Structure formats: C-alpha cells, structure tokens
Image (cartoon, rainbow, N blue to C red):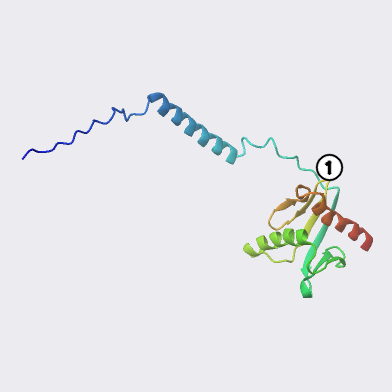
Amino acid sequence: MAEAHSHRSAPPSHDPTVPRFMLIATAILLVGVIAVAALSRQGVIGRGGEAPIVAPEQSRALFFKDRSQGGIAVISAETGDVVAVVAPGEGGFLRGVVRGLVGERKQRDITAATPFDLNRYADGRVTLSDPMTGRSIELVSFGETNLAVFTRLFEDLEAAE
C-alpha cells in the first residue's frame, strides 16, 4: 500500500526579530512619557493654561436646604434669611450642581454646617465653591441660561438686604 504524502508548501520565511531602530524609538518614547508625567505631577510643567488667582468682585455665602414637597430654600449665611425658593420640579440645573457638591461632602463625612460660596468675577465668570472640599464649579461653562439661574441669586440677595 502506498503512503499518501501531503505536499504542503513551506511557510514563507519570516524574520521574527524587531528592527533595532524600532526598539530604540519605543524606548525613547516610553522614557519621554514617563518623564512628562513625573514633571507635570510635580508641577514643573503644565501650569501655563491656569488662570491667575483673582479675588471675586462679589461673593455670597449660601446654604441650600431641602423643603417639604421637594423645594429648595436658598439661605443667606450672613443674615439667615431665605432669599430664594426653588419650587418642586423646577431649577434642575441648580439642583444638579448643589446635589453634586453635597454628595462630595457626604462621601467625605463633612457636615452641612459650612455654607457654599457663590462668587462673581470682573471677567464675567461665576463659580459655586465648597470651602470644605476645595471644589469649585465654573458655572459660565454651562451656558447663559444655566448661568442666569445663579446670577439671579445675587439680585435676590441684594433685594433681601
């Protein structure tokens, strides 16, 4: 009985080694990435885009308290007066921003005894910041309609005084 031999062609010759210049280029790239990451973490590079620290033109300390039936009272920390009330089902942007700041306090077990700071700057920026966590939200980046929700609080505060 004759044996059947399969005639397979040999695989094409392939050199599995990586060219030396590719290894050197990869090593240089990795060293560069690690160096940039280390320098930026230490603050040596990457600070060019930060805005200089400027005092706000107007600043108010505020508490945001939940009311019955889902409303939110905005209270002046200076006077203790309710300066605005957000009705249930309204003020979604304000609710979201405040909820985010309050949630961060809860994660860190920080009490609600310290008010938030609403700041307006000469260049038009408005921020809501939490002095307890150091977090600050640039409200102008959410558009004019959402920004107006917070700038209106300055008017409400002035009217209450």
Mark 1, Cα crowd under 10 Å, few <14 / some 14-19 / many 20+, is: few
Residue 161 seen in this snapshot: no
In the image, what residue occupies the spot 14% across and 36% down? Answer: 5
The answer to whether residue 63 shows anywhere in this view is yes
- Which residue is more in the foreground, 160 or 151? 151
Q: Position of residue 88 (x, y in %)?
A: 79, 69
What residue do we see at 7% from left, 38% from top?
2
Residue situated in front as seen by the camera: 48 or 68: 68
For residue 58, side relative to residue 16 (left or right): right
Q: Is residue 9 above or below residue 161?
A: above
Compared with residue 138, is residue 100 higher up or lower down, i.e. above or below? below
Give the image location of residue 105, x and y in percent: 67, 62
Image height of 5 relative to 119, above or below: above
Q: Residue at x 31, y 28 (%)?
A: 14
Q: Amino acid at mark 1?
A: Asp
Q: Name the residue at 65% across, 65% down.
A: 106
Quarter holding residue 1: top left
Q: Which part of the image, by quadrant, shows the C terminus?
A: bottom right
Q: Is residue 5 left or right of residue 43?
A: left
Residue 146, image x, y percentages = 80, 54
* Residue 66: x %, y % from top left: 76, 70
Q: Is residue 115 left or right of residue 11?
A: right
Task: Read off the residue under disc 1.
Answer: 123
Q: Secondary structure at mark 1?
A: loop
**Which residue sits furthest left?**
1
Place residue 40 in its image quadrant. top right
